[in-house]
Amino acid sequence: MSVMLPKGGNAPLPTGRCEVTVTTAPAGAATDVCAVLLAKDGKVRGDDDLVFYNHPAQDGVALGGRTITADLSAVPATVDRIAIVAGIDPTLPNAHFSAADTPRAVIECGGVRIGFEPPPFTHRETVAVLVEIYRRDGAWKVRAVGQGWDTGLAGLATSFGIVVDDAVPVPLPVPVPVAVPAPAAAPVPVPAAVPVPVPSAAMSLEKVQRAAPGLVNLYKAAHVSLAKSGVIGQRAAVYLVLDHSGSMSGFYRDGTMQHLAEQVLGLSVNLDDDGTVPLLFFSNGVDLIADLNLENYRGRIDHLHAPLDWGGTCYTPAMRAVIEHYQATGSADPAFVIFQTDGEPFDRKATRELLRRASALPIFWQFVGFGPSRDLRFLRSLDTLDRRTVDNAGYFAAGPRPASRSDADLYDRLMKEFPDWLKAARAAGVIR
């Protein structure tokens, strides 16, 4: 029996031994194959759940060349699905899939042969999930995924919860043995595969675990979003600016502001190795400038804001204070400023002009709006402001219950426009 699946299609599988073989056009780019064992939350249970050339077997799943063999009867119940991945080393020149060499998958299981050929990859994809074998109502099925990314295996691995610290061995092509007629010459040693260095977070997971174990999950979630957006390896000074106007009191009282501060610190240790976030409270003016770090973050927001008076809302004093602080540091890295507020400022015209002038500086302003969207129209206008050297601002509405958003969603939204700014700022000479 032979079946061809369309993208998104699925088919049942017998419980037993299944083989998934990945092929490309004969002259296509050198392609490596791996499998990722995933739990119900879509994440690995641990780093050993990546099956590749340097770790070729795990819990009933094994790699041999370009074939993944899965003994479905031996896969533990804690594994909900197995993603079959094809990739190219993204550090090689011009190494990416094309329409001509988009990889295909053939699944053979219990006399059933299932094929899948994804739509052509035409966006410089370097890694793709071709198919996934998954559990459904106590049985196994296969789904045709065909989703590609341009992040390479390292980027995809982090999206599955595998933390890349300093260097991840990216699978390299396995040499094909060549038969040598007798008498054979002395065997020529084949060089071992060498790990390919990939960009890493500013601070290692081990250091965060030692200094602030309560931030580990935030660190990991931020790492995944940075990898998906292609920002892993980028260094930036992360600032947090918090609105202390009277309408914000409920967000401080219910712990939302402390939670946001911890989320920002989890992001910062991926981008900046000093483990410190400059922290600024503002209302009519600048109310307080302090810091947030791995040692003092617990309860930090309540401790700092409690003596402060509630006020109105003016953006420009806080923005100028950030610019002055950043310039005083002499940093060679850009600044990523998370500017939180729940309403329009009194100084709208001055804010627009300051944002225009600041567009020539290596500072990106990520505005985060709390509360009803009707109160945040001015923030949306800053996102599309004209007459700037580069677009130096992003905006998203976190809604009236910001703390109910998942960490992953927050980080994905924070990273939505920052990568584009980095490219534009480099092109314009704003950053190196």
Image (cartoon, rainbow, N blue to C red):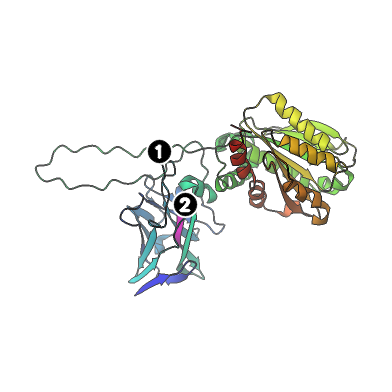
Confirm whether the magenta stretch covers residue 131. yes
Is residue 209 visible in the rendered image? The answer is no
In depth, the one of 160 and 15 nearer the eye is: 160
**Label 2 or label 1, whichever comes before in sequence order:** 2
Q: Amino acid at mark 1?
A: Pro
- Please, is residue 195 above or below residue 328 in the view? below
Does residue 259 show up?
yes
Quadrant in which residue 362 is drawn:
top right
Instruction: In the rendered structure, find residue 330 and report the number of the disc placed on it.
Output: none
Q: Position of residue 400 (x, y in %)?
A: 79, 55
Task: Classify residue 4 by image quadrant.
Answer: bottom left
Give the camera-side residue of 385 and 404. Answer: 385
**Disc 2 residue type?**
Glu
| Nearer-the-camera pick, 365 or 85 | 365
Secondary structure under badge 1? loop
The answer to whether 58 appears left or right of 413 in the picture is left
User: Label 2 crowding class (10 Å Cα cut-off): few <14, some 14-19, many 20+?
Assistant: many
Could you say where residue 190 lies in the image, as x and y percent from the top left? 26, 39
Question: Does the magenta-highlighted stretch encompass residue 218?
Answer: no
Instruction: List x then y, in percent, for residue 148.
Output: 48, 55
At a point 88% along the width and 36% down the height, the residue shown is 308
- On-image quarter of the C terminus: top right
Question: Is residue 359 rendered to the left or right of residue 269?
Answer: right
Q: Is residue 266 left or right of residue 301?
A: left
Q: Foreground mark, 2 or 1?
A: 2
Q: Position of residue 80 (x, y in %)?
A: 50, 61
Front residue of this view, candidates 245 and 284: 284
Residue furthest to the front: 387
Q: For numbered disc 2, what is the local secondary structure?
A: loop
Numbered circle sitting on residue 125: 2
Residue 195: mark? 1
